[in-house]
Image (cartoon, rainbow, N blue to C red):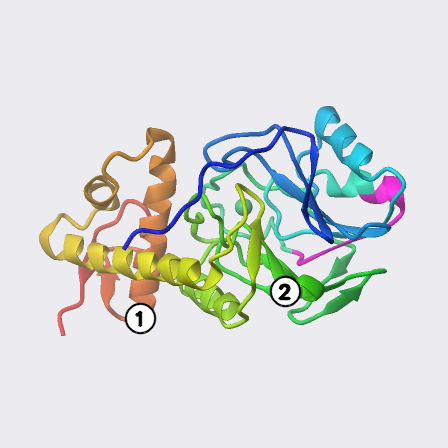
Amino acid sequence: MSIPFVKDFDFKYGECSVMSPLVKRVIANNPGPFTYTGTGVYIIGNKEVAIIDPGPNTPEHKNAIKKALTGKKVTHIFLTHHHLDHSPLAKPLALEYGCNIYGLSIDIKKRNSFPSLEAGEDNTFKPDIDVKCGDLFKGGEWTIEAIHTPGHTSNHVCYALREENLLFSGDHIMGWSTSVVSPYEGHMGDYINSLKKIKERNFSIIFPTHGTYIDKVDSFIDAYINHRYYREKQIIEALKTGSGLILDIVKKLYLGLDKRLYPAAAHSVLSHLIYLREKGVVMATADNGLDCHYKIIES
Ligand SMILES: [Zn+2]
């Protein structure tokens, strides 16, 4: 039932590494419990280039990206979603290189005031052009396809590089860890469907924003999906015997977890419970929340 994570890989912060004939990567020096070794920024193409998720807006990282872009024409900046470790450098780079930012807008103010996790949200997130699932974008040597993959966030988009049958998966699929699916921005039912959507495409290789690449794509996604179903089963079992409080479920299910990730685990359990309520399996004493009691609906 374990996911074949790959945690070790060689890199140097700020260095531009060649990942494939059309793909280069620069890793920002922003390691943390959600970013792992930091944000991996991908540069696609050799002359006319696109950038996927430029990362944090720090002078050191911006200089590293600019160095990697020397002599190149930047035509597109693509964003997978609006988290602070992915998008803040997009606007400064777009202004500097005179190109558009592509992504999926989100009305951050309209959202539920539920506490956010991860590195937080980029409140200035505003793509120039909203992508639709299946949209194609052409550069000199490359074709990029936008694939809407809601789940981690409702506006999460993965980008496929058609010429190399590879996928830039953002935070949807990561090689070092499972992805955070946190209500209400994230949704477990959407997330599992988005994993199936990517699996059907038979990509040869996946480049996530954090950590190294995944090359055994099919078995990795299977393990990723099975992990969520296994958690769901564990939660149902815990509800049958326990108090029905999320904190108790977390303590039971996440033995040995890094304490910094406790809130993330609680949110993940909540997203399973919300999904189980939607499926008519579970009921709650109040609105979907972190503190109410959940129990199985007896059939
Ligand atoms: Zn994220």
Residue labelled with disc 2: 165
SS of the residue under disc 2 = loop
The residue located at (22%, 60%) in the rendering is: 233
Q: Quadrant of the N terminus?
A: bottom left
Q: Which residues are magenta?
A: 94-105
Q: Position of residue 193 (x, y in %)?
A: 45, 68
Judged left or right of residue 70, residue 298 is left
Residue labelled with disc 1: 279
Judged left or right of residue 289, residue 162 is right
Image: 126 above or below 161? above
Amino acid at circle 1: Lys
The residue located at (67%, 56%) in the rendering is: 105
Query: Where, by quadrant of the figure, is residue 285 drawn?
Result: bottom left
Whether residue 214 is visible: yes
Image: 283 above or below 98? below
> Which residue is farthest front?
21
Front-most of 201 and 180? Answer: 201
Label 1 crowd bin: few (<14), some (14–19), many (20+), radius 10 Å: few
Q: Is residue 49 magenta?
A: no
Query: Where, by quadrant of the figure, is residue 253 drawn?
Result: top left
Q: Position of residue 171 (x, y in %)?
A: 53, 49
Q: Is residue 101 magenta?
A: yes
Q: Position of residue 221 (x, y in %)?
A: 43, 60
Q: Position of residue 2 (x, y in %)?
A: 30, 51
